[in-house]
Image (cartoon, rainbow, N blue to C red):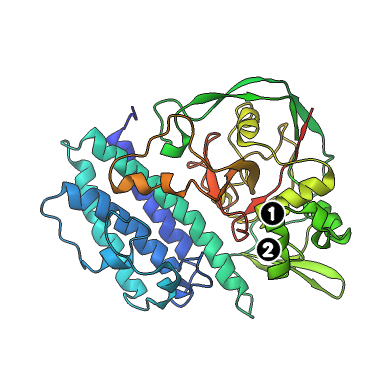
Amino acid sequence: MLVIDRPALAQRYAEVRAFTEALSRPLTAEDCAIQSMPDCSPTKWHLAHTTWFFETFVLRPNVASYVSPDDRYNYLFNSYYEAVGERHPRPQRGLLSRPSLDEVYRYRAYVDERMAGLLRDERESERLSAIVTLGVHHEQQHQELLLTDVKHVFSCNPLRPSYSPAAGLRAGPGTLGLNWRSYGAGLAWVGHEGFDFAFDNEEPRHQEFVQPFGLASRLVTNGEYLAFIEDGGYSRPELWLSAGWATVQERGWGAPLYWERSDGSWSLFTLSGMRALDPHEPVCHVSYFEADAYARWWGARLPSEAEWELAAGEVPTRGNFVESGRYHPAPPRGETSPDQLFGDVWEWTRSAYSPYPGFRTAPGAVGEYNGKFMCNQYVLRGGSCATSETHIRATYRNFFPTDARWQFSGIRLARDE
């Protein structure tokens, strides 16, 4: 049973909602309206959709006097909840010039005012507090998506605009040596258990047998991935899964997303604009196919999510998260072993995204949150430089299709022992 402190929840709600708007502040109204590809959504849509979530799942069912500022928002800002009704096509979100950005902010203020009143109500139920908590974490997911989507939008602009100054961006002192942490065979506990928040896909907690394995002490760096490129990594079919090889051929991949080569030198696009490639930083914006191919080239493999979670349970949940203002992966620090399990880049695992034993979807529309996506996706772990430190935990399961590259996704190697 999730334990709720209502005054703390009201404060957390206000803080998370304010942080979303703080992340949007560097952007112009024009920036907020663009959709650069179907997987991305305009910032304006993120601002509205997260508000729609509280309106739809909290205010409408629980406040008899609630009146929406515009009932059409239910169609415009529903994402994928079939039980809620029809919605505007996802690839066409960038065509929504109306409502204006100012109207969306007014929508947020309107809902926030009514949510504040509801959260002060002593009659508020535990069930209601649970859905508000889910909504807060849902908004934090969209904060991360907002940044990754803005990065893709800006990368498509020939001016290569900067979202923010290069906070803390400096060359690393050098790449730390790669070592291996060994783990013995045995039953490992996997999944969430306790009274703090977790998504339904993190439950139920269960045991999995893990064979002896080794986990790399740090993430794969840009310099190491460049060696893979220079060794013909993108032109060697024996390194690739068949679907990965077909994707490389079809899309002409020759480097991670946002990498560019000019006059023999590599640079990459960041949320602070273009900059020279730092060989010591973790490689980022690679697909599952690329991560798997690199691991094969190295003579290793990707970890399973059970292996990753076993290792993560032994280190502190700290790292380079969105609160640092860096918005970019940092060189390894060597503070723990393994290092950088949390923050910097989401780490691909070799585990398909599937339900844990005993998993059941929640009733109603909220049950569509995670369960229906348990097909044709792979699990990533650990969070990134765009993830909030108050949102991540060792049991958190992110998931994306095998060809997705616009997220802050990277590589940690594993091996059999």
Front residue of this view, candidates 335 and 379: 379
The percent position of residue 189, horizontal first and vertical second, equals: 56, 23
Quadrant (top left, top right, bottom left, bottom right) of the N terminus: top left
Q: Quick check: 26 above or below 19?
A: below
x and y, in percent, of residue 218 in the image: 75, 40
How far is mark 2 from mark 1, CA to CA?
Answer: 9 Å
Residue at the image position 51 percent from the left and 24 percent from the top: 206
Contact (CB < 8 A) between labels 2 and 1? yes
The image shows residue 50 at horizontal and vertical percentages of: 36, 57
Residue at the spot 45% in from the left edge and 70% down from the top edge: 91
Q: Residue furthest top?
A: 186
> Residue 181: horizontal and vertical position, in percent?
76, 29
Which amino acid lies under the numbered mark 2 shown in the image of this protein?
Answer: Thr
Q: Residue 145: which numbered mark, if any?
A: none
Q: Give neighbour class at mark 2: few <14, some 14-19, many 20+ (Cα, 10 Å).
A: some
Looking at the rendered structure, the secondary structure element under dot 2 is helix
Q: Amino acid at mark 1?
A: Phe
Q: Which residue is mark 1?
A: 289
Q: Which residue is mark 2?
A: 247
Quarter of the figure that contains the C terminus: top right
